[in-house]
Amino acid sequence: MITKEQHKFSRLEKVIGKDNLNKLKNKSVLILGCGGVGGYTCEALARSGIGTLILVDFDKVDESNINRQIIALDSTIGKLKVDVWEERINDINKECKVIKIDKFIEPDNINELFDYEINYLIDACDYIPTKKEIIKECLNRKIKFISSMGTGNKLDPSKLEIVDLRKTVNDPIARIMRKFIKDERITSKVTVLSSTEVPIKTGETTPGSTAFVPSSAGLLIASYVVKELVK
């Protein structure tokens, strides 16, 4: 039986407390890339009472997304991902403010992201030049962030972990990013989500993916960010 004390986030409140729940209601999180990893991060944050979600993605839902992206359905194919997300979040929590940026972000226009107040930035995009620039900008602006490395061609979600970039192994994207921070002489901690699993060789240029590795990565990131925001 539902009592008056119960509400959408009452079960979360039992775990983190009322004060921390109120903290989350006043936080703004930017998610760059709302696909396999970023989508599940977005879902979990929306269901955790985050006050503002800034969603950045230029892409439309494609049939090939259905195996791993939570918003990808036959009924959403062809729709802008940020539009689908706005509708979904409104259906989860109307009090959550959704800001949509439906454009491809690259180093030349990355400053547009920082026109908004950002308490935490989640990089779940797969464009390497943008990932590099995000690290530099967040460190320079003292914005807390976490960057997702590669989840493609991997089968075992138990191999996922959140570590400093320098401690990553068996991750082709992380290898590129490690060289980047070394070349740029970046000494600050760079928090990333990575997998220690050796990638499966498919012989294809486009990586394969599953329903369970990107989703698990997204949920791990959401958990980490929530805990960081209520510290």
Image (cartoon, rainbow, N blue to C red):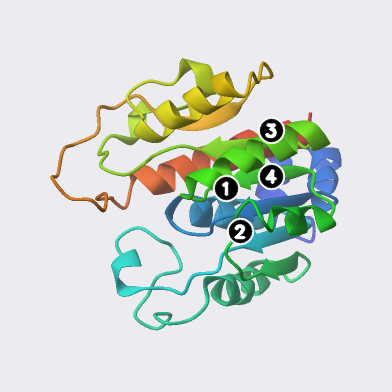
| Any part of residue 7 in sight | no
Number of numbered callouts drawn: 4
- What amino acid is at disc 1? Thr
- Side of 199 relative to 148 (left or right): left
Q: Are marks 1 and 2 in contact (CB under 8 Å)?
A: yes
Quarter of image, res 94 = bottom right
Mark 2 or mark 4: which comes first in sequence? 2
Residue at (29, 27) in percent of width and height: 197
Give the CA distance from mark 3 to mark 2: 27 Å
Q: Please say if 23 is above or below 1.
A: above
Quadrant assignment, res 198: top left
Q: Give the amino acid type for the residue marked by disc 3 in the picture.
A: Lys
Q: Quadrant of the N terminus?
A: bottom right
Q: Earlier in the sequence, mark 1 or mark 2?
A: 2
Q: Are marks 1 and 3 in contact (CB under 8 Å)?
A: no
Residue at horizontal 56 percent and vertical 38 percent from the top: 147
Asked whether the viewer can see residue 62, the reply is yes
Question: Disc 3 designates what residue?
Answer: 227
Q: Which residue is mark 4?
A: 121
For the residues bearing labels 3 and 2, Cβ distance under 8 angstroms: no
On the image, the x and y values in percent for residue 230 come to 78, 34
Packing grade of label 1 (10 A; few <14, some 14-19, many >=20) is many
Could you tell me which secondary element the residue under label 4 belongs to?
A: strand
Give the numbered dot on residue 130: 1
Q: Position of residue 52 (x, y in %)?
A: 77, 59
Q: Looking at the image, is mark 3 or mark 2 earlier in the sequence?
A: 2
Amino acid under disc 4: Leu
**Nearest-to-viewer mark from 3 and 4:** 4
